[in-house]
Amino acid sequence: MIRPSMLLALGALAVAAVACAPASETAVQAAPSAPATCAKDQLTLKTPGKLTIGTDKPAYEPWFKDDDPANGKGFESAVAHAVAKQLGFESGEVAWATVKFDTAFAPGAKQFDFDLNQVSVTPDRAKVVDFSKGYYTVKQAVVALDGSKVASATDLAALKDAKIGVQVGTTSLQAVKDVIKPSAEPNVYNEQIDAVNALKNKQVDAVVVDLPTAFYVTAAQVENSKIVGQFGAASGTPEVFGAVFEKGSPLVGCVNEAIDKLTSSGELAKIETEWLGSAAGAPELK
């Protein structure tokens, strides 16, 4: 039995390389429009009458809970169930397929109708698979050692005088410059591990990485560290997670329609706050 902390560490490891993309590699793709009807009985599905959703196993926190995507707990499980409901499916009509992370967005036929597994939308991936609209915009996170001078910061202003470490060429570096605007230039490192080691050695007060990576840093890389909080980018093209589809899937437009409804109703924001906010140890910094 793997402890929840270990699940978190391993899960974040799987997404760290994906979510922490250099700023130039991330882009939101235009998605197909919804078909004339998204009635449940008109949907083209892998198994008639069943909505099949893929994800990796183990399914890690905080994206899933208790390694059970079907329970509706955890951010992506909750999103999946909410989308399924919008499409007309009860929980008993949803099947989950085990799909390795990198297999989800590899070329070729898929065993799922769509896959949710913290997959960032990029132009290269969009050449061989289709993506939905973003269901999660990746935010940046501040990680510090417990008891440090910034560990108890509750807003961005408290970070102005902090010595911040960050990896070169990343969305995180741009966010530090545009949003935190520290009084001193951040310490910039060629590799993320160098920034992490600087934090371990107390050469910086904090590091800024994307939120999925922050879960991994605190769970597996730096003992006695914490996520001080998370914040959004000021401008530029945001990095988003999208549902993955087989190329040419007619279901993309209907899932986009469902995401639009969940966004406009505020339900998607509530799901994010519940599973990726303070409860997950990542309060908002403003």
Image: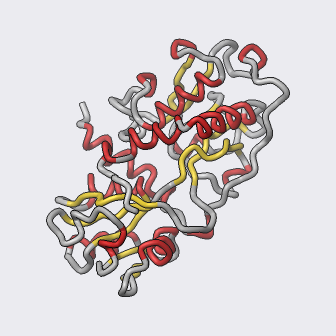
Q: How many numbered circles does the render carry?
A: 0
Q: Quick one: quadrant of the C terminus?
A: bottom left
User: Which image quarter: residue 64?
Assistant: top left
276 displayed left or right of 111:
left
Q: Nearer the viewer, residue 195 or 145?
A: 145
Above or below, 126 relative to 194: above
Above or below, 204 relative to 82: below
Q: Nearer the viewer, residue 211 or 264?
A: 264
Q: Residue at x 42, y 39 (%)?
A: 63
Q: Quick one: quadrant of the N terminus?
A: top left
Q: Position of residue 86 (x, y in %)?
A: 63, 25
User: Which image quarter: residue 183?
Assistant: bottom left
Q: Position of residue 28 (x, y in %)?
A: 67, 55
Q: Residue at x 23, y 61 (%)?
A: 222
The colour scheme applied to this rendered structure is secondary structure
141 displayed left or right of 109:
left
Q: Position of residue 178 (x, y in %)?
A: 50, 75
Q: Nearer the viewer, residue 142 or 56?
A: 142
User: Which image quarter: residue 148?
Assistant: bottom left
Identity of the residue furthest to the left in this view: 147
Q: Position of residue 107 (x, y in %)?
A: 69, 44
Q: Residue at x 80, y 39 (%)?
A: 33
Above or below, 133 relative to 185: above
Identity of the residue furthest to the bottom in this view: 184
Identity of the residue furthest to the right in this view: 36
